[in-house]
Amino acid sequence: MTTVCFLAALVFAAQPAAVDSQEIANPFADFETHRLANGLKLWYKHLPSDPVVSISVALPFGSDRDPPGKEQLAHFTEHMVFSDQPGRTEEEIKREIEERGGVYNASVTADRTFYYVHIGSEHALYALEWLHRILAPHAMDPEVVERQREPVALEVRARPRQLFDWLAAYVINPPFLRTPGFWEQEFGLGTWRSRDYYPFRSLYGITSGDLLDFYDTYYVPSQMTLTVVGDIDRGAVLDAVTRTFATLPARAEPEPAPPARDPGRYRQTLFWGYRSDVRYSNRFKFYDLSADQEVVLVFIRELLSKRLNDRLRFGDRKATYGISVGIVKRGGAGYLHVTGGIKPEEFGFAKAVIEGELEALRGGTFSQEEFDADRAAVTRQLKVRSSASEDLEVWVRDLFYDSRVHADFPDLAGAFAGFTREEVQTFARDFFVPERQVLTIARPHPLTQGTLLLLAAVITWFTVHFTRRRLIRPVDMTRIRYVARFRMPRAYSVVAALALIAFLAVVVRFVAFIYEQLTYRHLVQLDSFLVQWLAYAAMLAFGVFLLMQVPAHIPRKILLFDDHLRIKYLSYRSVPIPADRLGEMSLLRFPAVWSSRRIWKCVPLTLGLLEPGIYLKRGDGWAYFFNVRDRDELVRLSREIAESDESGSSPEPPIGPPGPV
């Protein structure tokens, strides 16, 4: 019995070694590249025993090519290629694949358009011909265009703008006041954020001619990458492609997109907010990588992801649920992105680990044995993750879609197995440098929301108290002779209120713009909670101060004293007009004020159409045009005060010009 157990143990112990010795097939090997006469590139891979064949067509053009005012044109074109064709309705086209058990779809991003069909191998040749009919030249019939317009509108939620939409587009958030987005800041690539993007207007402004022109310009065979992967005979595929895609007419290639711009500077952004973890985001930008450089970048992504997760997720100190390392591309520009949510108490440790791993890549400081083991592990994982036809298709969709960069399908697994520490170090030393780094860290706020609210209330109270003391001036009310309230016609009041609201909206938006610029350019780059939030407190106090200025500049009453007049505003503030500085006070009608130079530096509180208004001018040139219940009495008393003044002294100097109404 002991001998049997011993032999069984030996057999069991030997099993892992036997499994490890098995070589996993390389799914990236043996990809064939064929260039057709019209310039179209075919990638073919025979994948035995895979029940699904993946057929796709990639184009390196997307919504970045939408002209201003015609946004969604690339998207609309993608919808149109699935629409009616001669002798076949859209529903019939759909059933042709679905009744054979296949699935199909398409997607449009900023820099690419991608079409695919997944289907059983027995129907693969039919699906290949079907996809060719989809992508063949379309007439873009106006009736079909109108039928397809509504589905696109529903998908992008296009609707006519209403009042508040127009205010938001041109007053609250006009394009010229918007802070540039990431791609514009770091690469100089414009986005719809910098446009007046109105999807309803742009979508319903697209014509069949626009769609036809977009198709003819960008659906160029020499820019297409046709990929066929699965258990399908090579000769049959080449014959089918010759009958179908090879017949697409060759056309001139479109002009290349403007190159991305490298600002050549390090940038960090630091936040504190109400969250449970520290959000870490570290991006290293790249520009116009070659095909070989992209393969090195993919290897570094896999290597760095494994090493970081081994230490931060699976190590003794569980600092994070997971660190993600990804590659994001947009044309020739892009970045490697290290991101994850980290436990606050472990953030210092995790940040040191990430920076240490990046430095190890640049310096090549890890041992050869360690590098060899990690390289073998990520190579095996890569093979397993890419063993099916749909997995290989994803590489084309996400990274290898531009035929101008990738002439052949990269053998990633073969390249991975051959990389050396020195090759990785050379790439990392050139690309993972501070002047190409964008670091963003969002930490948990150290103050509770209740504490922050209390501090905001205290700041607001002190600001109100301080501003009131600055605005209010003591007045000897024992010498008052007359008080009159300004009277405004109801219609005029409504128009004035709307004008005031519009004016305030513009002011608030400009203040917000200044706040965004100060925050983006300076404040969020400071690694100090105290400095940042002291600045936010100062901004809050300044905002309250500005808000209090609004009612303090809306005239409400006129007060007559023995030796001066005084304009009392809606709150806090009043402006004295000494008798000797009373320039003019007379009854005038609309033309004498509104159609003359008197309107300059005048606060008009009435129109003077149905009845005359009082025109009161100060000695410094500022004036008021208003009405009260008893105009004659106010004018008479004012003139008496002016005539009785002999000293010419002023009880107190005027406090600035009247504010806007």
Image (cartoon, rainbow, N blue to C red):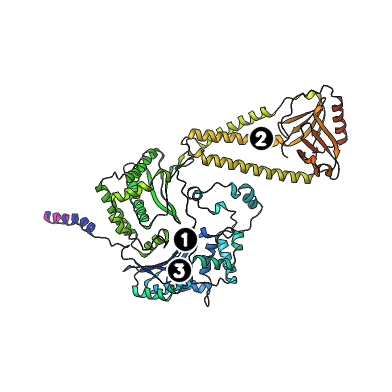
Q: Residue at x 58, y 60 (%)?
A: 70
Q: Looking at the rendered structure, which numbered label has been put on residue 221?
A: 3
Q: Give the range drawn in magenta.
A: 3-9
Q: In the image, is residue 7 part of the stretch drawn in magenta?
A: yes
Q: Is residue 40 above or below residue 533?
A: below
Horizontal arrangement in the rendering, residue 7 relative to residue 389 (left or right): left
Seen in the picture, residue 549 relative to 324 is either above or below; the reply is above
State the quadrant of the N terminus.
bottom left
Given the current orientation, which residue lies at the most extreme bottom position?
Answer: 87
SS assignment for the magenta stretch, majority:
helix
Image position, residue 125 (x, y; %): 40, 74
What is the crowding at mark 3: few (fewer than 14 residues within 10 Å), some, or many (at least 20)? many
Classify the position of the C terminus by image quarter. top right
Is residue 523 visible to the viewer in this orientation of the structure? Answer: yes
Q: Judging from the image, what secondary structure is the residue with disc 3 in?
A: helix
Q: Which residue lies furthest to the top in this view?
A: 647
- The numbered mark at residue 112 is 1
Select label 3 or label 1 by which is in front. 3
* Above or below, 110 relative to 311: below
Q: Earlier in the sequence, mark 3 or mark 1?
A: 1
